[in-house]
Amino acid sequence: MDLNIASAVFGLLGAMLGAGVSIATTAMSNNAQVRNARQERVGRVVDAQRETYINFLSQGDLFLDLARELSAVLDTGAHEGDSRADATFMRYSAEWTKFVVNCAAVQISGPPDVANSANQLRLKIGAWSELIDRRYTDGKRWRGHDEAVDAARMSAREARAEFIHHAQSWLTQPKWSDS
C-alpha cells in the first residue's frame, strides 16, 4: 500500500507540475501576444501621426507657394478686382482653409509639443498671409511693407523648422517598453 500511495503522490505532483508549466507557458504566450498587439497599435498610431504631419507641412508649403504667386501677380500692378489677381486669391484662400484643417488634425493627434508648434506655424504663416491680404485689398504697398513681409516670412520659416524638429523628435522616440 505504501508503494501505491507514493505512486499516487508522485503522479499527483507530476500532474500539478505539468499543469503549472502549461499555465505559465500559456500566460507568457498571452503576454507576448498582448505586448505585440500594443506595439503594432502604437506603430499604426505613429504612422498615422507621421502622415498627418506630412500632410500639414505639404499643405503649408502649397499655401506658401500660392502666397508667393499672389505676391508676384500683385507686383505686376494687379489688385482686387483684376481677374488674374482674383483667381489667384481664390486659390490662395482655398489653400489657407485646407492648411487650417490640416493644422487641426495635427493638434488633435498630438503630442502637445508638436500640436503647439503646429499652431505657432499656423499663426506665423497667418501673419504673413495677412500682409499679403492687405496688399491685395489695398492695391498697393505701404511704408514698411517689404520689411514687414520679409520679417513675417522669416518668422514662418523659423516656425516651420521648429515644427519639423518637434515632429521628428516625437516620431523617433520609443513609444513602448518590452516590460
Image: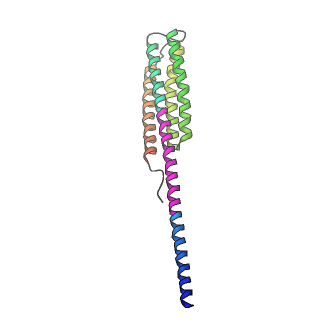
Give the color scheme: rainbow, by chain, secondary structure or one colour: rainbow
> In percent of the image, x 51 and y 56: which residue is there?
33
Spot occupied by residue 94 in the image (x, y as percentages of width and height): 55, 22
Q: Which of 80 and 50 is in front in this view?
A: 50
Spot occupied by residue 61 in the image (x, y as percentages of width and height): 45, 27
> In percent of the image, x 53 and y 59: which residue is there?
30
Q: Quadrant of the N terminus?
A: bottom right
> In percent of the image, x 44 and y 27: which residue is there?
153
Spot occupied by residue 97 in the image (x, y as percentages of width and height): 56, 26
Q: Is residue 49 magenta?
A: yes
Where are the magenta residues, as a range? 27-56
Spot occupied by residue 16 in the image (x, y as percentages of width and height): 55, 75
Q: Does the magenta stretch include residue 72?
A: no
Q: Which of 79 and 7 is in front in this view?
A: 7
> In percent of the image, x 52 and y 29: which residue is there?
99
In the rendered view, tell whether residue 54 sits above or below residue 173.
above
In the rendered view, tell whether residue 179 sits above or below residue 91.
below
